[in-house]
Structures are given as structure tokens and as C-alpha cells.
Image (cartoon, helix red, strand yellow):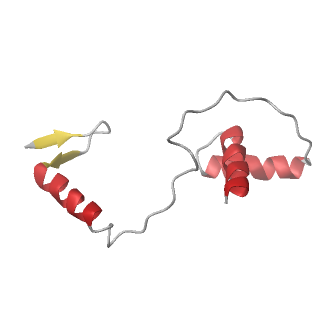
Amino acid sequence: MQYTSSNGITFTDKDIERWANEAEQGFPNSTLEPAQPYEWEHKPTMQARTIRAPQTVWNLLDQEAAKRSLTPSEYIRQVLTRSLVD
């Protein structure tokens, strides 16, 4: 049987079987990256805080966020969370 994912990619029962086998073997031919901390948990209500930083720091943050297709706020939250959780 053929299926279509929400992003338009088609796959078959054979693909599903292959993916299941890879998962059961621990994805032997894959490089896995850690998920964002707590992304599967309910997101708490956000609170706004003001911090002062030089314009050059804000420029760097904006550039890094854009490289990752994130808003500056999303990028800052990820960086802060990683630095506190790791």
C-alpha cells in the first residue's frame, strides 16, 4: 500500500517495515542529534523580561536566529535552556 505524509512525501509498507527494523536496531547507520530540551512537555506561559546588551550582541543573536529560521526570542530561549539544562 502507498501512503502520503503531511509534507507530500510518499512511502509504502516496505518503508515502514524498514524504519521499524532500523528503530529496533538503534538506527545503526544514522547520526542522531538530541531533541530540544522538554519540547514534548506542555509549554508554560511565557514571561517577558528585559535585559541589556550591546547592539553588537543583538546583531549576532539576530544573525544566528535567522540562520536557524527562528525568531530571536525562540533562539534566545533555546540557548538559555541548553546552558541551564546541560
Position of 79 with respect to 42 (left or right) is right
**Could you say which is closer to the camera, residue 8 or residue 35?**
35
Rendered residue at 70%/29% (across/down): 46
Rendered residue at 67%/27% (across/down): 45
Rendered residue at 76%/29% (across/down): 47
Q: Residue farthest to the left? A: 1
Position of 49 with respect to 41 (left or right) is right
Quadrant for the N terminus in the image: top left
Whole-percent x and y of residue 69? Answer: 58, 45
Q: Which image quadrant for residue 71?
A: top right
Residue 33 to residue 56: above or below? below
Position of 58 with respect to 32 (left or right) is right
Whole-percent x and y of residue 68? Answer: 59, 50
**Could you say which is closer to the camera, residue 66 or residue 17?**
17
**Could you say which is closer to the camera, residue 15 or residue 35?**
35
**Could you say which is closer to the camera, residue 16 or residue 40?**
40
Residue 1 to residue 18: above or below? above
Rendered residue at 59%/33% (across/down): 43
Whole-percent x and y of residue 59? Answer: 80, 48
Position of 49 with respect to 79 (left or right) is right
Quadrant for the C terminus in the image: bottom right
Whole-percent x and y of residue 39? Answer: 54, 43
Count of all numbered marks drawn on residues in the image: 0
Q: Which image quadrant for residue 10?
A: top left
